[in-house]
Image (cartoon, rainbow, N blue to C red):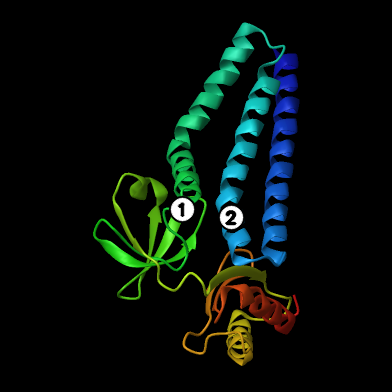
Amino acid sequence: MIDTLREVGIDALVVLGAGLAMALLLRFTRAVLDAVPMSRGRRVLAERLRPLGASVVVALYVIFATVWLLHGRDRTAALSIAVVLGVIAAASWTSLRDVVDGVYLRAARAFAIGDRVQVGGLQGRIQRLGYRFVQIETTDGELAMLPYRAIAGQAILRSPGVDRTSFHVFRVRLPAGVSIADARQTIRETALLCHWSSIAREPQVVAGDEGALEVTVFAVHADRAPDIEHALRRALGV
């Protein structure tokens, strides 16, 4: 019995280590996609495929981890491990459903950052699309966090907030020693001084996780939006 527990513990550590490596790889892939300059169409496609690809990787990890833990076990040990995995899956079902619904909605392009939407009794502009929730700025200026499961079963009234030919979103990470306020000011001044930037709309900056900023710029022509992104990255030193 002790030997079995020891073997299960070692295998569990291997599975956890592999899960940590997978999480780091997914974060690195996201950082690379955020840093690589690309056209608006390619970035939109990347944003659509990224959650779907991440979900496939996670699903494959879960399958292989389960097979790894159950391989070579006697019936009692295998049943115990299966029960534990089932309890964990049941406890995290709400979060898993949010992630799955989010992948479906984003892959189907049900909405995008900057769109004005009405879901149920809530109306506002989409500020951020997370893994489990969508952040909406209401008409009163408040921020609402809606889990994807609350949106998937409802009718969505969507209207693009800006002309799609001039709407461009990208993410940057703040350099060391640069505050969010200073970065906002630098982004605003640099974008408005760029002759490809629209003077009618200032860039929008939303603070994300891990020191990242989500920047929305408005270009006079869609093909020139990456030029504005290059100028902002140079100004920020990233």
Q: Amino acid at mark 2?
A: Leu
Q: Amino acid at mark 1?
A: Arg
Q: Residue 131 in the image: x percent, y percent?
A: 52, 51
Task: Look at mark 2 in the image and give the residue it sits on.
Answer: 45
Q: Is residue 236 visible?
A: yes
Q: Secondary structure at mark 2?
A: helix
Residue 124 image-quadrant placement: bottom left
Which comes sooner in the sequence, label 1 or label 2? Answer: 2
Q: Residue 77 in the image: x percent, y percent?
A: 63, 13
Return the residue found at the far top: 75
Q: Classify the position of the N terminus by image quarter.
A: top right
Q: Residue at x 36, y 46 (%)?
A: 152
Q: Secondary structure at mark 1?
A: loop
* Front position in the image: 54 or 161: 161
Spatial CA span between label 1 and label 2: 10 Å
* Front position in the image: 9 or 41: 41
